[in-house]
Amino acid sequence: MANEALARSPAAITDEEAPPGRLRTAVGWFTRYPTIPILILLMMVVCGIFAPLIAPHDPLRPNVIAQSTPPAWYEQGTSKNLLGTDHLGRDMVSRLVYGARVSLLVVVVSTTSGMVVGTFLGLIAGYFGGNVDEVISRVVDIWLAIPFLLVAMIIVIVLGQSFTLMLGLLALLAWSPFVRNVRAEVLSLRERDYVACAKIAGAPAVRILWRHILPNVLNTVMVIASLRVGQLILSESILSFLGVGVPPPTPAWGSMVADGRNYLNTAWWISTLPGIAILLVVMAFNFTGDWIRDKTDPRLRQLG
Amino acid sequence: MSRFIARRLAYSVIALLGATMLVFGLSRAVGDPRDLYIQEGGYGTTPETRKFLEKQLNLDKPLAAQYGIWLGRVLRGDLGNSVFTRAPVLRQIRESAPRTLKLGLVSWVLATGMGIPLGIAAAITRGTAWDKLARGFALLGQAAPPFWIGIMGILLFSVKLRWLPAGTEGEGLAIRNFVLPAVTLGWLAAAGYMRITRSAMLEVLDSEFIKLARAKGVSGWKVIWKHAFRNALIPPLTVSALLLAGFITGAVVVETVFAWPGLGRLAVDAVSNNDYPLMTGTVLVFAAVYLVINLLTDIAYAFIDPRIRFS
């Protein structure tokens, strides 16, 4: 009896045990998940994958008679170009939709490859220690001591501008935090009893790392990745803005902002709109990253 | 302490050597290095120029010797001549460096002066509208591309309101020229400072010794300034080096947006003119500045927090 009363007392109803009915309502979902950021990211992914189906016009085709057409809500605007056209008469909506592709590729290719390489190096540095660790850690230190953007600019001068090169450069920017944090975690994991047992049982290092250690660091890896993505997209936009990222005429949000710089007097939308796109996507990634971190492991707070 | 400084100094020197190797290696890794030092002019290049360059770059010697000679020249301040303007790279750097330094200092003062007090204020008023406002400011600063903030500033204050100049052309570096670039450059760093100060302050305010001080009857402000603030200052200090990386990137971007005739502008121009020697020079200068500040931060940190020295 007493137990039952205790269980029913209001104090015992924690957040986790809230009445189940309420959680399933829309309000519950809104408070529990970062709904708006997830919707923004979903939109970016859909736009990136299905760009040719969504975009109303060819993003690369200039139109001499429709240069700098304002968005549809202006008197001079037309419903053909909802967000107007840029200085060459290319449709803004289509270019913005195609621009999502670049960001999506940055997320998929650069973040993932940086994550895989960084995690691998962190695993072996932490597990084997000694000289392996020393070399890897020092390389990370030195790499972090060199201003990345300028190195990227030099590499672009030498190798020439290309999309693949940019993705590679961003992967170079992505890997180092994975090494540091994974290494730190492996250092404590390798002292655990189950690792010692596996060793005694004769398991080779590869198996121990793969089966016993990697699953335990995956959480950290995912959190770092989610916190890192926004930064990488921002870096991509900076590279493209400076003219060392995605080569024209491929639409990238950063270079679109650069295109509109000389037309601020007459056509504010050319620079403003792609900037808003970057802002929204980066913010959405940051929010989701924070959320994943707080949900899975609040101890990682200092990473952000 | 001196051992710690010596070790840190050694890392910095190695990192700087690494940077020079990277720069040198890149020039020799792909294709004909002579192409990087030749501007295809209206008449093309003659075999004589190629021959001359081969001698100048010591291409007939082994790679290690080439690097040694090149490094020796760099250390003596001979960074070569710009391919585009033919002027010595060092002179161009000397002319633009003070302008970048001025802009950087103003932005740094702005960022520190805004970020740290805002962070403290947000931590003290945790959960209120004021806290949310400060965090929104930080969130925006960390998610908005710096070049876009600059351009929006121009759009609003130069094009629409006509309060501030959009660039520096023809006006020299008057105070009004500093406002937009410094705010643009400072915002990102201020956002970083604010976030870190806030979380450090929250952590300290939550600790036992603060509770003890409060229980002993120390007044509210005294607890915040004398007990909490000093301890919360360490994390913002450690990240100042990281934020500096953002400053260097930021300087390149902001100088491009506002046509600021500094080092960052020099680097961007070098890229668009395919000016390899000029690019090399600016990168090495930036890397050296970056390393020195990193080193100073590390030492300052070890000075404040003795635990670091012995780890």
Image (spheres, helix red, strand yellow):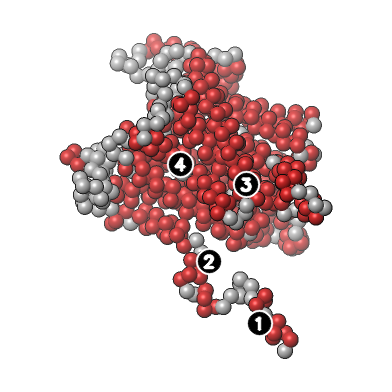
Report the residue marked by disc 3.
B121
Marks 2 and 1, the one that precedes in the sequence: 1
Residue A16, above or below A128: below
Contact between labelled residues 3 and 1, with CB atoms less than 8 Å apart: no
Q: Residue furthest bottom?
A: A1
**Which mark is drawn over residue A177?**
none
Say the numbered circle drawn on residue B145.
4
Quadrant location of the N terminus of chain A in the rendered image = bottom right
Q: Nearer the viewer, mark 1 or mark 3?
A: 3
Seen at 52% across and 39% down, the residue is B187
Up/down of B152 relative to B84, above or below: below
User: Which disc, if any, is residue A32?
Assistant: 2
Q: CA distance from mark 2 to mark 1?
A: 24 Å
Q: Nearer the viewer, residue B180 or B25?
A: B180
Read off the chain for label 2: A
Does label 3 lie on the same chain as label 1?
no
| Percent coordinates x, y for residue A215 in the rendering | 62, 60
C-alpha gap between disc 1 and disc 4: 51 Å
| Residue sitting farthest toward the left | A65
Residue type pointed to by label 1? Arg
Discs 4, 2 touching: Cβ within 8 Å:
no
Q: Nearer the viewer, residue B21 or A89?
A: A89
Q: Which residue is mark 1?
A: A8
Assign a secondary structure to mark 4. loop
Instruction: Pick whichever of labels 4 and 3 is earlier in the sequence.
Output: 3
